[in-house]
Image (cartoon, rainbow, N blue to C red):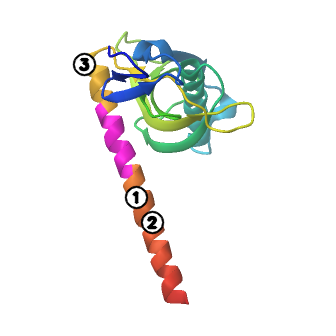
Amino acid sequence: MSHGSHRTVFGMTEHTGRPPSRPTGYSRVTLSRIMTAVDVNLYGTVHGGVIMKFIDDVAGAAAARHSGGTAVTASIDEIAFLEPLRVGDLVHAYAQVNWTGTTSMEIGVRLEAERWDEVSEGEPVVVATAYLVFVAVDADGKPRPLPAVVPDSPKNEGRWREAEIRREHRLARREAIQRHREEQRQREK
């Protein structure tokens, strides 16, 4: 580590005003629940909105743990529904911080189901995956610095790099849309 007011953490400079770095494992959270009859849609499977709320809940818990305080959902980058959930399924939601910026972080979520009506002792079924962006906020709701996440395994280094790609795409998409809207405004004048 160099002396002075900063140090390099996995390609990032951490200034003294920022909380100390934390390993990926620090933020890991697991929530579990059984799907009930109130969770189903007209087709007899668990409603997508119920799954989305569960994903947001576990991601929020990981974000709060990592940031050491309040963190709010800024965007949902992607949710993939891979298999249907049914009444009686025991669902485990796993979340962790994959990447951090100065005030924002990406949370990766995986949902796995244990089917209540399957006698086999096979592996749980992955039913959904998601990536969400959270922002750490202070008591006034303003963004605040958060600890850098330090990948603690080669797999988590890969997740960090993939999160950077998703971030670059989000920013490029936002910039392209803003350019388009400005061009539209110019044409409408």
The magenta segment: 161-169
Which sits earlier in the primary sequence, circle 3 or circle 1? Answer: 3
Nearer to the camera, 24 or 121: 24
Residue at the bottom extreme?
A: 189
Mark 3, secondary structure of its residue: helix
Mark 2, secondary structure of its residue: helix
Q: Cα distance, mark 3 to mark 1?
A: 29 Å
Which sits earlier in the primary sequence, circle 3 or circle 2? Answer: 3
The C terminus lies in quadrant: bottom right
Report crowding for label 2: few under 14, some 14 to 19, many 20 or more residues within 10 A (C-alpha). few
Residue depicted at 52% across the width and 16% down the height: 29
Q: Cα distance, mark 2 to mark 1?
A: 6 Å
Find residue 126 and report its image quarter.
top left
Q: Is residue 181 magenta-colored?
A: no
Q: Where is residue 108 in the image (x, y as percent from the top left)?
A: 43, 29
Is 169 rendered above or below residue 56? below
Q: Main secondary structure of the magenta part?
A: helix
Q: Where is residue 30 in the image (x, y as percent from the top left)?
A: 52, 16
Q: Is residue 164 magenta-colored?
A: yes
Q: Residue 173 carries which label?
A: 1
In the visual, does 151 lie left or right of 74? left
Nearer to the camera, 129 or 180: 180
**Pointer 3 residue:** 154
Residue depicted at 32% across the width and 13% down the height: 1
Q: What residue type is labelled 2?
A: Ile
Is 153 rendered above or below residue 86? above
Residue 101 appears in the picture as rendered:
yes
**Pointer 2 residue:** 177
